[in-house]
Structure formats: structure tokens, C-alpha cells
Image (tube, rainbow, N blue to C red):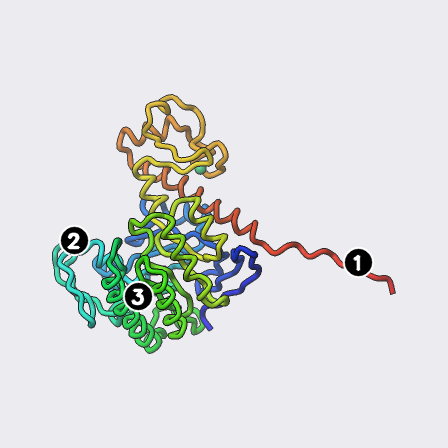
Amino acid sequence: MTLEFKLRNQTEAGGRRAQLVLPHQTVETPVFMPVGTAGTVKAVPQDVLETLGAQIILGNTYHLYLRPGHEAIRRMGGLHRFISWPRAMLTDSGGFQVFSLSALRKVSDEGVRFRSHLDGSSHFFTPEHSMDVQIALGADIAMAFDECTEYPAERSRAEESLRLTMAWARRSLDHFRAHREEVVWHEELGGKTQSLFGIVQGGMYGDLRRESAERLVEIDFDGYAIGGLSVGEPREATLEMISEVLPLLPKDKPRYVMGVGYPDEIEQYARMGVDMMDCVLPTRAARHGLLFTSEGRLNIKGKKFAEDQGPPDPECNCMVCRRYTRAYLRHLMHSGEALSGTLNSIHNLAYYLEIMQRVRASLEPAPEVPSQAGSA
Ligand SMILES: [Zn+2]
């Protein structure tokens, strides 16, 4: 058994405190996963991610497939070794980027033909090919190949998209099961293998979401993700779709909501029973000068910070807040210095990871009351 999900406590609201045992790391959940698109969490070195307490990071299959190429990464010992990240990793299926970044897509039942956003070259992704690429990359968790339904989508369009995603889920798992032992660290880690998660789609239609969840559970994946959210829909719709799906997923397997969200959202979803989340927001916002703080969102470009000697967030104990002032961060941003993105990203990631740390602490099982030792 390669993925073990040890549920330690569940609250009445559904929040779960658990451990996700993966080949490279035992991950304490609920967990926030920083996004390392092209083999790097943009602007933040790996040792800093470790210091911040990141337990698992994402890699993007589409980007790594195009550059430097999955076969090159396999030859270099897999993604963990290539980027020097000893802890857990998850790769997406490439589907989301194929649909959002590439030009001239042509979707058929067989797969997706698309042109690279880098050089216009033509590529064909099928569920089987996505599995091969993800096995070459060798993250601890791989994702089934899916079509991310755009928002808004007519019901007929969402139905058709769901039909495709369900057929691709089956093909992904069949191919994955036949080849999962080809992962480069299989022998080194005592015969462990990667795990594969299925992805619930269905647009913003509750019944389609429920159908998607039920059918995926029947296929039987190692874990379940809810995809196709945070694609421009109102936040109530995101919440509604998550609420529809969570009760249908097995209690003894991890649940992952993809691509969310703002700090208050990740806390809210974790307390409802979501175990894993990822989002580019903390790092992307950071590079634009937006800091998430205990005092709310702070645009560090603001003139009022020009001589502000205070730390970015007075409540934060991260390495940036302990050392630097708002005035300095503003100066770096204004001067276009590379350090700007690094420091802003470190703080925002620290803020997100600290939220999850706090949520985990609050979900711990109540301490056992020591029983009165009866004297014999
Ligand atoms: Zn900080």
C-alpha cells in the first residue's frame, strides 16, 4: 500500500485532522500546497520552503513536459532529484494548462491536440500519455487526465465535458495501474509507487457534480480531487459545489480541492473536511506587491509605506517580517529588484502555511482525560 490516510479526528462540521503517508513524506493534513509550476515555487529557494514548513509542493505536467521534457527529468532521477526537493510532490495532469494556455486545441474522445505556448509546436495528449509523463516525473501523487469545464458553461456543454472526463478517468487509472511500478524511485524506496487521484468535474451543476463523484468512487482512486473551481464563478457557487461533493467521497481517502483560494477560503474549506488545497495566489499576488496579512490585504506599492518602519505583518513571525520593513519592501518593488518577489512570496507563503498550522491545531482530538487510577 503506497498511500495511507490516517484519520485522527473529525469534527461535527466535517473538518478532519489526518496524516497522509506518502513515499517521500508523511504529510500532516489539512495541508496547503505551494505551486511549483516549472519545477520551482517562483522566486523561493527549496531550503526556504523547508524552513517555512512546506510539506508537499506541486509541479505542472504541461510546463515540465514542454521544458525540459519528462524524459530528460526521468534520466536525471525524477522530479524530486532534479529540483532537489526531498519532501512530497504532486503533479497535475496537464489538462488545465492545455485548456488554458495552449493555442489551437482540438479535443476528441481520444485526447487533445494542441500547440505549445512556447514555440507553436504541435502535441497530442491522451490520458495514457499524461500518465506516462507523470510517471516519468515521479511525483508522489499523480492526477487523472480531465477536461476542466470552463465558466460559464451551458448544461449540455457541462454534460459533454463530464462524459469525456469520466471516460478519461477510467483510461487514466487503467494505464496508471499497468505502469505505476516504472517510477524511477520504485526500488530505491522499497517497492513504493505513486498514487493516482480522480477529479470531480461537472461545472456549476450540483447533480452533475454528484454523478461525477459517485462514478469516480466506483472506479476507486487513491484519493479524490474537486476540479473546475476558481474559474471565475461567484464564491457561493464554489462553496455549494464543494458541499455537494464532500459527503459522497469516502471518509478514509484524501480530498483535494484544486486551485483555491484566498486565505479565509482555505480555512473555511479545511474546516468543512477538505484535506488538501493548492493555489498560485500567494506567490502570484506577491510578485504584484499584494501581501496577505493579519491586518488584511496590503498593497506594498502604496505611497503611505514609503517610510513605514514596521514589519510587513506585525503578527507574523516569518523570516521576512522579523528582518525587513514595509518601507524596504516597497523600495524593492519600486526599483524592480528581483529580491522583491522573493521576500513578498516568502511572507505570503508563510501566512498561508501558518493558517493551515493553526487549523490543524484546532482540529486535534481532545486530549484524553487521565483516568483516575483506582487503587487496588
Ligand atoms: Zn511574514
Decide which of tag 1 and tag 2 comes sooner along the chain.
2
Q: What residue type is labelled 1?
A: Gln
Count residues near mark 3 (Cα–Cα under 10 Å), then give few for <14, some for 14-19, many for 20+.
Answer: many
Q: Hey, which residue is sitting farthest top in the picture?
A: 307
Q: Quadrant of residue 222?
A: bottom left
Is residue 131 visible from the viewing direction of this image?
Answer: yes
Whether 71 is drawn above or below 281: the answer is below
What residue did someone put label 1 on? 372
Q: Is residue 299 left or right of residue 364?
A: left
> At 43% from the left edge and 49% from the top edge, which residue is drawn?
266
Q: Distance between the residues labelled 2 and 3?
A: 20 Å
Q: Pointers 1 and 3 in contact (CB under 8 A)?
A: no
**Quarter placement of the C terminus:** bottom right
Give residue 6's position: percent from left, percent from top.
Answer: 53, 64
Decide which of tag 1 and tag 3 comes sooner along the chain.
3
Q: Is mark 3 on a helix, strand or loop?
A: helix
Q: How far apart are marks 1 and 2 (CA)?
A: 69 Å
Decide which of tag 2 and tag 3 comes sooner along the chain.
2
Q: Is mark 2 on a helix, strand or loop?
A: loop
What residue did someone put label 2 on? 118
Q: What residue type is labelled 3?
A: Gln
* Pair 1/3: label in front: 1
Give residue 55's position: percent from left, percent from top.
Answer: 45, 54
Q: In which quarter of the image is residue 296?
A: top left
> At 56% from the left edge and 57% from the top edge, which residue is drawn?
12
What residue did someone put label 3 on? 134
Give residue 290's position: percent from left, percent from top.
Answer: 34, 36
Q: Pointers 2 and 3 in contact (CB under 8 A)?
A: no
Q: What residue type is labelled 2?
A: Leu
